[in-house]
Amino acid sequence: MDYQLLEILSIDKFEIFKICDRIIMIMVGAKIIVSGRVQGVCFRDYTQRWASSLGLTGWVKNLSDGRVEALVNGDEDNIRKLIKEIKEGPSMARVDNTDIEWSDYKGEFSDFKITW
């Protein structure tokens, strides 16, 4: 990269790298169903905190059958990081299975919430 040209144009080279990172992000959606001991162990809070820290949007909720469901939108790499953390779960949880259904990015959420 020609840094002299960037200086002439008054563009910060780190800003260019930041823009390039955003351009190569692959935005997707994912529905994640988690089974095991995942209710009553702060699993939704754990998921919400991780998703928010990764810049993801969507929601997480308990299902009536004892599982937890999350609908997530954002950068594919960050969703994969979230899935890795979900498989680990908070200390009191036991994750037996995670089912993931990938989808197109819809951009329908502004943040990541715990819902009912």
Image (cartoon, rainbow, N blue to C red):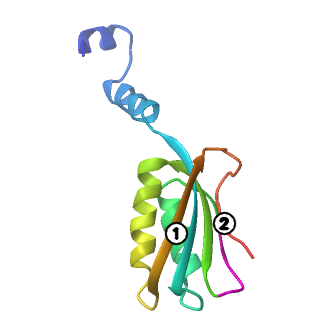
Name the foreground residue: 2 vs 12.
2
| Image height of 36 relative to 112, above or below | below
- Residue 112 lies left or right of residue 21; in this view the side is right
Quadrant housing residue 16? top left
Q: Residues within 10 Å of mark 2 (few under 14, many from 20)?
A: many
Q: Which span is picked out in magenta? A: 60-65
Q: Residues within 10 Å of mark 1 (few under 14, many from 20)?
A: few
Decide: marks 1, 2 in contact (CB < 8 A)? no
Please give the name of the residue rendered at 69% of the width and 52% of the height, measured from the top-left corner: 109
| Residue denoted by label 2 | 113
| Residue denoted by label 1 | 99
Quadrant housing residue 11? top left
| Image height of 30 relative to 8, above or below | below
- Alpha carbons under labels 1 and 2: distance apart: 20 Å
Please give the name of the residue rendered at 55% of the width and 85% of the height, measured from the top-left corner: 42
Dot 1: element: strand
Please give the name of the residue rendered at 39% of the width and 35% of the height, measured from the top-left corner: 21
Q: Residue 104: x, y in percent?
A: 60, 44
Nearer to us of marks 1 and 2 is 1
> Residue flagged by tag 1: what amino acid is it?
Asp
| Image height of 73 relative to 82, above or below | above
- Residue 19 lies left or right of residue 44; in this view the side is left
Asked whether 61 falls inside the magenta stretch, the response is yes
Q: Residue 35: x, y in percent?
A: 53, 82
Q: Residue 8: x, y in percent?
A: 33, 7
Counting residues from the N terminus, which is met first, the one under dot 1 or under dot 2? 1
Dot 2: element: strand
